[in-house]
Image (tube, rainbow, N blue to C red):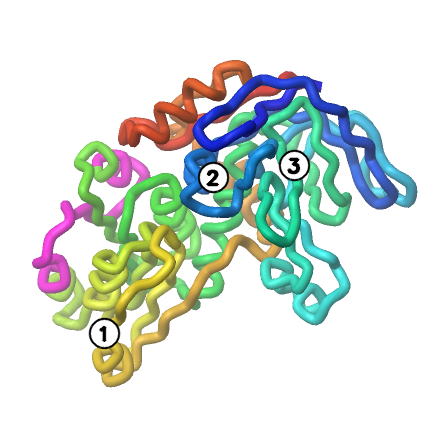
C-alpha cells in the first residue's frame, strides 16, 4: 500500500509498505481522510521525541471498513467509521473506570517512542481494535469526520474542567483546538465565552463561530474580563497554547474558586504562581486526549452545533503531504487544519 513515511526527521516520502491485516478483534480501515495534527508537525522535526523514524504518522482519521478480524461482530465491510487515536487495553483499572486516556498500556496511533512503535493513518490502510472505532452518519463527509479526534479532545476538556450551564469562560488561544473548545463550550450552555489570541484573523474567526467577545493578547486582559463579570473574573479558563505566559494569564483571569483547564502542552515545564493558586483556591485540571467522547462529538458535528468546515484550510491528496508538512512547519498562521486523502471516497 501507499504510505507517507517519515524516513528521517524533516523528510517524508511516499513509500510502498506492506498492507496490515485485521487481527482478532481488529478492523482494517481503508483511510479516506487524515488530518495533520500539531503533534505530527512536532514529530516531523523531531522536537517531540515521540515520532522516531521510520514511521507512518497520523491519528485523526476516518474511512471505510475493508475487512474485520475474528470475533468482531459490531462492524462489517463497507461501514463508514472513525476511531480513537488512543489504543487502550480495555482491561486495566483505568479502562475499567472509563478513563481510557489513562490506560496503563496506552499507545497512540502514528507514534514511536522508547516503549512502542505503532504506524498510523497517513496510509491507504490502517488496522485498529474494533473497540476504539465508531460508526459515522451517512451524510458526514470524511474530511469533516477527520476532525472528530480533535473534537473529542475538546469535549473531554470541557467535561473534566467541570464547566456547567451559565458559566463564563475564557479560551486562551484561537488555534484549531481553541476554536473547537469555543464551540463545545457554547454547546454546553455557557452564558459567555471569551477568546484571546495574538492573531487578528483567528480572533475574527472566533467571533464568527460565536465568541461573546474577542481580545488581542494583552497584560490588561484580567482587568477587562473583571469589568465584564461584576469585578470577579471568569468562572473558568481553557488554556489551549501550553506556554508559561498563557497559563499564567489564564490563572490571572479566573475568579476565586475558578477552574483552569490545561489543554495545550507545548512546554515540558512551566513555573506557576503557587501562592495565588492556593490562596484563591484555583483548581488546575490537566486535560489529556479524550476518554471515548466520540459519540458526543459525532452528535455535535452531525447536528450542526459544532462547525468544522471553517477550520479546514485544505483537503489534498496524500502525495502532497511533504509540501503541506513543510508549510505547517514553517508556521503559516493562515493554516489551521490540513487534511490528506489517501484514497477512499
Q: Is residue 306 visible?
A: no
Q: Quadrant of the C terminus?
A: top right
Identified at 29% across, 59% down, the residue is 169
Residue found at the far bottom of this picture: 279
Residue 130 falls in which quadrant of the image?
Answer: top right
SS label for mark 1: loop
Q: Position of residue 90 (x, y in %)?
A: 74, 59
Judging depth in this view, the residue of 46 and 158 nearest the camera is: 46
In the picture of the structure, the residue carrying the numbered disc 1 is: 273
Identified at 29% across, 53% down, the residue is 171
In the picture of the structure, the residue carrying the numbered disc 2 is: 43
Identified at 59% across, 57% down, the residue is 291
Q: Is residue 194 left or right of 98 when viewed as pictured? A: left
- In the rendered image, residue 221 lying in the magenta stretch gets the answer yes
- CA neighbours of label 2 inside 10 A, class few (<14), some (14 to 19), many (20+): many
Magenta stretch bounds:
204-224
Q: Is residue 270 visible?
A: yes
Mark nearer the N terminus (1 vs 2):
2
In the picture of the structure, the residue carrying the numbered disc 3 is: 119
Is 70 above or below relative to 103?
Answer: above
- In the rendered image, residue 13 lying in the magenta stretch gets the answer no
Mark 1 vs mark 2: in front:
2
Amino acid at each position: 500500500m501507499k504510505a507517507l513515511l517519515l524516513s528521517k526527521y524533516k523528510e517524508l516520502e511516499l513509500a510502498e509498505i506492506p498492507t496490515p491485516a485485521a487481527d482478532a478483534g481488529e478492523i482494517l480501515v481503508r483511510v479516506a481522510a487524515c488530518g495533520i495534527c500539531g503533534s505530527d508537525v512536532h514529530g516531523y522535526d523531531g522536537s517531540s521525541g515521540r515520532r522516531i523514524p521510520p514511521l507512518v504518522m497520523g491519528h485523526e482519521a476516518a474511512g471505510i471498513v475493508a475487512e474485520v478480524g475474528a470475533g468482531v461482530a459490531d462492524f462489517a465491510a463497507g461501514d463508514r467509521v472513525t476511531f480513537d487515536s488512543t489504543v487502550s487495553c480495555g482491561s486495566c483499572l483505568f479502562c475499567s473506570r472509563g478513563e481510557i486516556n489513562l490506560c496503563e498500556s496506552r499507545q497512540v496511533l502514528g507514534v514511536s517512542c522508547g516503549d512502542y512503535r505503532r504506524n498510523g493513518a497517513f496510509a491507504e490502510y490502517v488496522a485498529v481494535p474494533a473497540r476504539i472505532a465508531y460508526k459515522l452518519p451517512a451524510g458526514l463527509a470524511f474530511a469533516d469526520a477527520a476532525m472528530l479526534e480533535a473534537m473529542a479532545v475538546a469535549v473531554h476538556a470541557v467535561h473534566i474542567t467541570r464547566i456547567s450551564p451559565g458559566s463564563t469562560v475564557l479560551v486562551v488561544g484561537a488555534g484549531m483546538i481553541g476554536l473547537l473548545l469555543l464551540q463545545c463550550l457554547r454547546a454546553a450552555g455557557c452564558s459567555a465565552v471569551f477568546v484571546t489570541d495574538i492573531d487578528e484573523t483567528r480572533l475574527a474567526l472566533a467571533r464568527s463561530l460565536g465568541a461573546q467577545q474577542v481580545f488581542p493578547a494583552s497584560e490588561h486582559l484580567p482587568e477587562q474580563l473583571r469589568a465584564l463579570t461584576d469585578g470577579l473574573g471568569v468562572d473558568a479558563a481553557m488554556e489551549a497554547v501550553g506556554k508559561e505566559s498563557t497559563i499564567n494569564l489564564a490563572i490571572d483571569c479566573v475568579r476565586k474558586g475558578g477552574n483552569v483547564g490545561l489543554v495545550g502542552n507545548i512546554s515540558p515545564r512551566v513555573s506557576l504562581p503557587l501562592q495565588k493558586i492556593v490562596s484563591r483556591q484555583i483548581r488546575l485540571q490537566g486535560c489529556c486526549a479524550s476518554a471515548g467522547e466520540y459519540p458526543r462529538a459525532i452528535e455535535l458535528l452531525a447536528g450542526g452545533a459544532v462547525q468544522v468546515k471553517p477550520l479546514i484550510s485544505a483537503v489534498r491528496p496524500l502525495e502532497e503531504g511533504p509540501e503541506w508538512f513543510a508549510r505547517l512547519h514553517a508556521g503559516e498562521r493562515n493554516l489551521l487544519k490540513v487534511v490528506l486523502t489517501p484514497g477512499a471516497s
